[in-house]
Image (cartoon, rainbow, N blue to C red):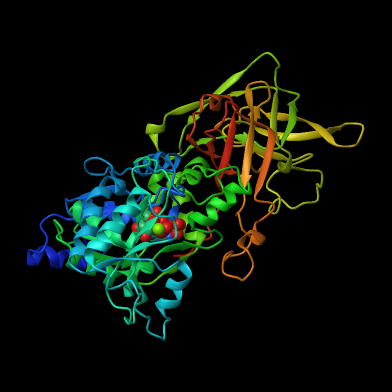
Amino acid sequence: MTDNEKPINFIQQVINNDLEAGAVTKVVTRFPPEPNGYLHIGHAKSICVNFGLAEQYGGGCNLRFDDTNPEKEDDEYVNAIIEDVRWLGFQWQGDICYASNYFDQLYSWAQYLINQNLAYACELNAESMREYRGTLTAAGKNSPFRERPAAESLALLEQMKNGDIDEGRMTLRAKIDMASPNINMRDPVMYRIKKMAHQRTGDTWNIYPSYDFAHGQEDAIEGVSHSICTLEFAANRPLYEWFVANLPLPSQPRQYEFGRLNLNYTVTSKRKLKQLVDEQHVEGWDDPRMPTISGLRRRGVSATAIREFCDSLAVAKTDGVVDMAQFEHFIRDDLNNNARRAMCVIDPLLVTLSNYPTDTGEEFVVPGHPNRDDLGERSLPFAQQIYIDRNDFSEDTTLSRKKFKRLVIGDYVRLRSAYIIRADEVIRDASGKITEIVGSIVPDTVGADAPEGIKARGVIHWVSAADSADCTVKIYDRLFNQAAPDAGEESFLEHINPDSLKVVEGCKVERGLTAAVAGDHYQFEREGYFTRDNKGSELVFNCTIGLRDNWKA
Ligand code: ATP
Ligand code: MG
């Protein structure tokens, strides 16, 4: 399906109507993360939607840090988020925006609402406020402070701001409707006292705005035309609209909600991901088992794969759980097209080819990729001693050729891009473990068919024993062993897969891969897709994904 044929989603429908009616001339969206954690695959969907729409309509998308809660926020997160958005290949318009840049403006709008008799300083503590709020079925009660004179609220707000009032003793609330069926409209909190320095504004403020009081106003300041968020904010929309309607804003943004992306076998909540990091169930936010953008990158998933996966998902008005296999399909597809081929022997077994000279070395030049000339060629040194994978040899000579397309004593296999060889005998150590196979080459079989009477069982990979490099490979399994780890009563931590990481040292890889840099992708033939790890100086490859695709569209 081409882009033109792709059915448009409900947000595109809204935008088309707005453009047609002249209600909007430039489409401006924003991606507004709170810098309280690293971005995950769910955020990638939101990024693709917001930046994608801006791109499609020739508008712009802002990157805005919703840094209204200094308690949980940190510059480490700000920097990681910037890196991730860039790496995904998106460019925000203008400078990076920060909600904290608007604190003065928000404050004067709070004063404005007080003067309009639409906000008041309330002295109910958290517990009383909860009682007064009512329930889903019972209306709330007006706060006893609701009708205090504006001048008094203004003065109290000033005191809150200056740090003259203790935390928890007072809030600023919008005066809306304590009987509203929508609890968000029952005089919601606009400001809370928090005597805490902010990473950008220092100790200028002792009060911080609530999400609801901040978000729409931030959108209006930035000229955001379509403020797109996830479904859990649908019930906040009337409040968003109330502030937009009651404040003298420079523009009139509107909010639209779409369904969150959830993936099975993982969690996509920053709070839970942070817990995994803090309690050291994983190495860090960028652990390759994490569904974070930085974890996926380190694992070897490309930005293209993430974008294509996100673009393949519906932008709908319902939440859904997407099968991990669907994501894996895009990851594999991308790597199949773009990863160079290489050979890596994960469990090396020495093979000495007795009829091959010790002093000659041949070099076989093979393509970097079977159908990508632009990925160049590589040179495979061949020698009398090579390594094959221990799994590619069996002592059981009764195994049928069909079942075991690998090496057995007295029979033949082809070494990928090299000779056909035969296994002649095994050599063992004192414990009986096979330490070496002695075999022989069938001459003149490089790039040529086997002579009459000889038939290779299959093709296996190998590397030169002397002319290869040692490396470590890390093989990952799902971080959780349940499809919905956070659905039950019990903690999601109980479903952590204890075998999600296997570290294999002493693997042997083509010597050319010593030049691999962080993020280089390879298909290790017959093994899977691997990426050079981005930590440390040792040669470590992370297994991104296996070769086989089980996903059915
Ligand atoms: P979390 O629940 O993981 O803490 P959040 O919604 O609190 O996520 P924000 O930093 O507020 O995280 O999110 C920034 C933007 O990303 C918001 O617009 C939010 O709606 C969107 N977003 C977050 N998670 C998802 C998801 N799973 N699918 C789609 N969009 C998401
Ligand atoms: Mg949030």
The residue lying furthest to the left in this view is 22
Q: Nearer the viewer, residue 516 or 356?
A: 516
Where is residue 356 shown, x and y percent of the image? 70, 22
Q: Looking at the picture, tell me which residue is in the foreground, 411 or 204.
A: 204
Foreground residue, 362 or 466?
466
Q: Quadrant of the N terminus?
A: bottom left
Left or right: residue 19 compared with residue 234: left
The relative height of residue 87 versus residue 399 in the rendered view (above or below) is above
Residue 209 in view, yes or no: yes
Whole-percent x and y of residue 140?
A: 38, 81
* Residue at point 35%, 75% (across, down): 144
Q: Residue at x 39, y 62 (%)?
A: 170
Query: Which residue shows up at 22% across the image and 60% down it?
Result: 226
Position of the C terminus, as image quadrant, is bottom left
Q: Position of residue 129 (x, y in %)?
A: 42, 72
Pick the residue in front: 74 or 109.
Answer: 109
Res 8 seen here: no
